[in-house]
Amino acid sequence: MKGLLVLEDGTVCSGLAIGRPGTSFGELVFNTAMSGYQEVLTDPSYAGQIVIMTAAHIGNYGVRDVEAESDRVHVAGFVARDFPERWSGTWGQESLGEYLGRSGVIGLHGLDTRALVRRLRTQGAMRAGLSTEITDPAELLRRVRESPEMVGSDLALKVSPTQVSVHPGEKDRFRVAAMDLGMKRNIVRLLNRAGCQVTVFPATASAAAMNEGSPDGFFLSNGPGDPAALGGPIAFVTDGDTISIDVDRHAVDLEVGPEELERRRAAWQPPAPRYTAGVFAKYAALVSSASEGAVTDPGPRRRVSQAGSPAIS
């Protein structure tokens, strides 16, 4: 089965398709992991995105349920240099092609992924379309340019859970209130392993609800979409013990402002005591990973009072 990939700048690539036939659109991004492709597929923070894997062979050890990071596949499409027909893995349950087909996702391989990644690195993330149905590149390009942009999208709210859940830790030395905007299961597992009982709240949770029971710390998770569309999480960020990564790191940027944020990030060393009470004592009160397609405008959004606390400007 043949497939077509078209980028919004007019780049056209053709290849062989696996998974479910059809047409899908999303923001084209890449991932450099050598393995862990099932974790990538089921990571909610990739919702609305077509992911290119830079490793040459993807799918060679099959798929198994225990390696999923959520309850379903979230990517809009999957691209690699080669999806091997044969796979061999300990306790593997099915092939990548079968898994994508059952999940309703198109996979495309047999194209020059190096050239695609170089284009994305120089031009930035852009919209793209994958199709096994549309054979005319001009028609697919037209539909790509009509597809929704990532700017302004609230995809994190769409992948967030609707109910509160509690995950006991190994010793429950600390209690963490986590806002889930697309959190992987492994984040909860690692916090549990560190002795934290994690209460996971949906993205619509209020600050009062998350503060109930006076948790030792707050965790703002990673997630898909535009950070600026997350009005609730942005309003939630306070001068407390907060760990944030990915999309919610930008929520911190947008709320606290660059001056105060720089104080908290400086030199990646243990910060002043006023930021280290509770569960995150001895560690940075703000932990961030930059693996997203958004950047925060460096212009000031909040001023810093003489006491060092953020104040509305």
Image (cartoon, rainbow, N blue to C red):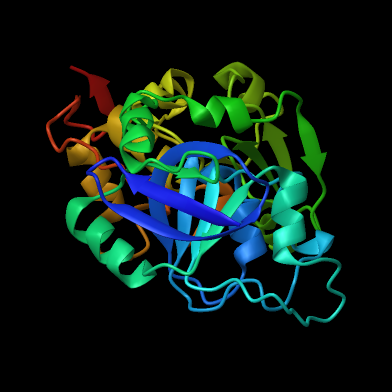
* Percent of width and height locating residue 199: 72, 37
In the rendered image, the quadrant that contains the N terminus is bottom right
Looking at this view, name the residue that lies furthest to the front: 136
Looking at this view, name the residue that lies furthest to the left: 299
Looking at the image, residue 7 sits to the left or right of residue 5; the answer is: left
* Percent of width and height locating residue 80: 49, 66
Look at the image and tell me whether residue 289 can be seen.
Answer: no
In the rendered image, the quadrant that contains the C terminus is top left
Looking at the image, residue 104 sits to the left or right of residue 226; the answer is: right
Q: Which quarter of the picture shows residue 149? A: top left
Q: Nearer the viewer, residue 195 or 89?
A: 89
Q: Nearer the viewer, residue 49 or 193?
A: 49
Look at the image and tell me whether residue 163 can be seen.
Answer: yes
Residue located 80% across and 38% down the image:
166
Residue 181 vs 62, above or below: the answer is above
Residue 59 vs 282, above or below: the answer is below
Residue located 75% across and 56% down the image:
99
* Percent of width and height locating residue 249: 39, 43
* Percent of width and height locating residue 58: 59, 72
Residue located 73% across and 50% down the image:
101
Looking at the image, residue 205 sits to the left or right of residue 15; the answer is: right
Residue located 48% across and 19% down the image:
232
